[in-house]
Image (spheres, rainbow, N blue to C red):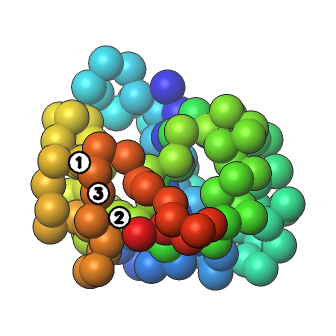
Amino acid sequence: MRIGLTVWGDRVSPVFDASRTLMIVEIEGTRVTNREYVSMHPGFPHHQIGRLIEQGIQTLICGAISEVPAHMAEASGIVLIPFITGNVEDVLNAYLAGRLAATPVFLMPGFRRGGRHRRRRGRFR
């Protein structure tokens, strides 16, 4: 499995749309087998989502994300785990342990998760 995390230094990038760096992690079972970084083109959703597809990303972990790239990612078959914050290694370890969604410390302030992100009138809530 190949997952992508948008990163800014050692943290999950707060906004996908402005992300310049994507960390790609290859996972077998619960073990990381490879890790690499590729550049992104912020501000151009079709380039950003194209980059994810080109890199074979199956799951994307990111901070806030606008509706257009979110819809594009999901329409491309990418599992989206948005509104995540924190140290990249901590987030990755929580994901590998299957407890990322159940750990409130990784949710961006003001975001409540009810199993999956919910939309109301076209906006995340």
In the depicted structure, whether residue 120 falls above or below residue 17 = above
Q: Residue furthest front?
A: 121
Q: Mark 3 falls on what kind of element?
A: loop
Q: Quadrant of residue 104?
A: bottom left
Of callouts 1 and 3, the N-terminal one: 1
The answer to whether the residues at label 2 and label 3 have Cβ atoms under 8 Å apart is no
Q: Position of residue 52 (x, y in %)?
A: 70, 48
The answer to whether the residues at label 1 and label 2 have Cβ atoms under 8 Å apart is yes
Q: How many neighbours does mark 3 have within 10 angstroms: few (below 14), some (14-19), or many (20 or more)?
A: some
Report, in whole angstroms, how far the alpha carbon at label 1 lies from the one at label 2.
9 Å
- Return the residue nearer the eye: 29 or 68: 68
Circle count: 3
Q: Quadrant of residue 34?
A: top left
* Number of the label disc, if any, that sits on residue 72: none
Of callouts 1 and 2, the N-terminal one: 2
In the depicted structure, whether residue 114 falls above or below residue 111 = above
Which residue corresponds to mark 3? 113
Which residue corresponds to mark 1? 100
Task: Give left or right: position of 40 versus 83.
Answer: right
Q: Quadrant of residue 115?
A: top left
| Residue 96 at least partly seen | yes
Q: Which residue is located at x 41 percent, y 54 percent?
A: 117
Q: Which residue is located at x 67 percent, y 33 percent?
A: 77
Q: Mark 1 falls on what kind of element?
A: loop
Report, in whole angstroms, how far the alpha carbon at label 2 lies from the one at label 3.
11 Å
Disc 3 residue type? Arg
Q: Mark 2 falls on what kind of element?
A: loop
Q: Position of residue 48 (x, y in %)?
A: 75, 61
Which residue corresponds to mark 2? 84
Report, in whole angstroms, how far the alpha carbon at label 1 lies from the one at label 3.
11 Å
Disc 1 residue type? Leu
Please identify the quadrant where the C terminus is shown. bottom left
